[in-house]
Amino acid sequence: MLKHDSWTKAHDIALVFLALAYTTDSDLSNAEVESISTSLSRWRPELTKDQVHAIVLEAGSVFFESEAEQEIVESVRSLGTALSITQRREVLEDAIRVAEADGVLLNSEQNLLSVLAGAWDIKATKDRLIDESSARLENDPEWSILHDIALLYIVMGHSADGHLKEVEISAMIDRLGEWETQLTVEEIRSILRAAIDYYSQGPNENDLTDSVLAIKEALPKSQRLIVLDDLVTIAKADGTVIESEKDIVESLSSAWNIDVRIAL
């Protein structure tokens, strides 16, 4: 189900909230659904409870489609353009309420809130809201866009034979160092270790989608192309590029709207 002609900003907000509530732990609790509905009611006070629930269901139908990632990105951008900065702050406040409805602000939820705040140019608001949150914070090491990039490096390196070869790790360190030239080799290794630790826990498809979406939101197309080139370099590091590695590059090219063919 694609967005229909009667799609409204309330639908965009609901879709963003659903992404926040579901993709972080692959579950929608009753408390989270109720929090989403309550927040939407504040935006559309003229609607009945049933009408609000209908909006949530319609947004949910889009969310569970295969092209949901692109639809979410479009909703984030649409809200960033259509809403005033005051309204964007209010949506972020509601997003925090949705995230903390189960009593815990997961690190992945904090990361996704950071993506929203960055896209809407309200990072200071996000920092304040998290500081003021009454929910228990999951205090994993801070996750940055470099960690997202490193995670994709690891997916690429591990996909060939289920192991990370030294030559692949060296290529990852070299490429990560080019993103932040002021970092020491040990700092780069620390980022890579954190990403490896996360990967070793067996992240699900939604976790990886979060990183893909974060990179798409944080980096312009020219830099997303560099990430793809990095991945090709890592795929070639052991001398052999297999079909699954080609599939990863092609999938990311599509997700990031990069219509170029990279030689493999």
Image: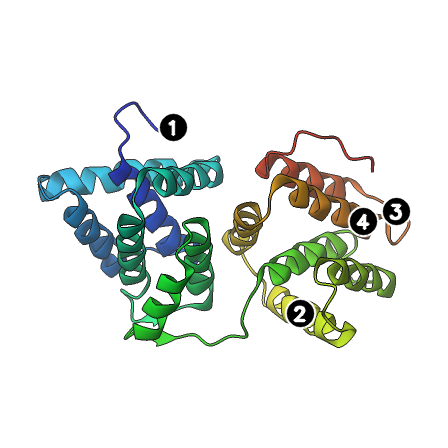
Distance (Cα) linking label 4 and label 3: 7 Å
Give the camera-side residue of 157 and 109: 109
The structure residue drawn at horizontal position 78% and vertical position 51%, both measured from the top left corner, is 160
Q: x, y (%) of residue 235?
A: 80, 49
* Amino acid at pointer 2: Ile
Whichever of labels 4 and 2 marks the residue nearer the N terminus, that label is 2
Q: x, y (%) of residue 193?
A: 69, 72
Residue identified by numbered label 1: 2
Depth check, mark 3 against mark 2: the one in front is 2
* Amino acid at pointer 1: Leu
Residue identified by numbered label 2: 191
Residue sitting at the far front: 85
The structure residue drawn at horizontal position 91% and vertical position 49%, both measured from the top left corner, is 239
Whichever of labels 3 and 1 marks the residue nearer the N terminus, that label is 1
Distance (Cα) linking label 4 and label 2: 20 Å
Distance (Cα) linking label 3 and label 1: 39 Å
Whichever of labels 1 and 2 marks the residue nearer the N terminus, that label is 1
The structure's colour scheme is rainbow
The structure residue drawn at horizontal position 45% and vertical position 59%, both measured from the top left corner, is 114
Q: Residues within 10 Å of mark 4 (few under 14, many from 20)?
A: many
The structure residue drawn at horizontal position 34% and vertical position 43%, both measured from the top left corner, is 15
Residue identified by numbered label 3: 240
Is residue 85 placed above or below 143 in the rendered structure? above
Distance (Cα) linking label 3 and label 2: 26 Å
Depth check, mark 4 against mark 2: the one in front is 2
Q: Secondary structure at mark 1?
A: loop
Residue 235 numbered mark, or none: 4
Depth check, mark 1 against mark 2: the one in front is 2
Residue 192 is left or right of residue 36, and the answer is: right
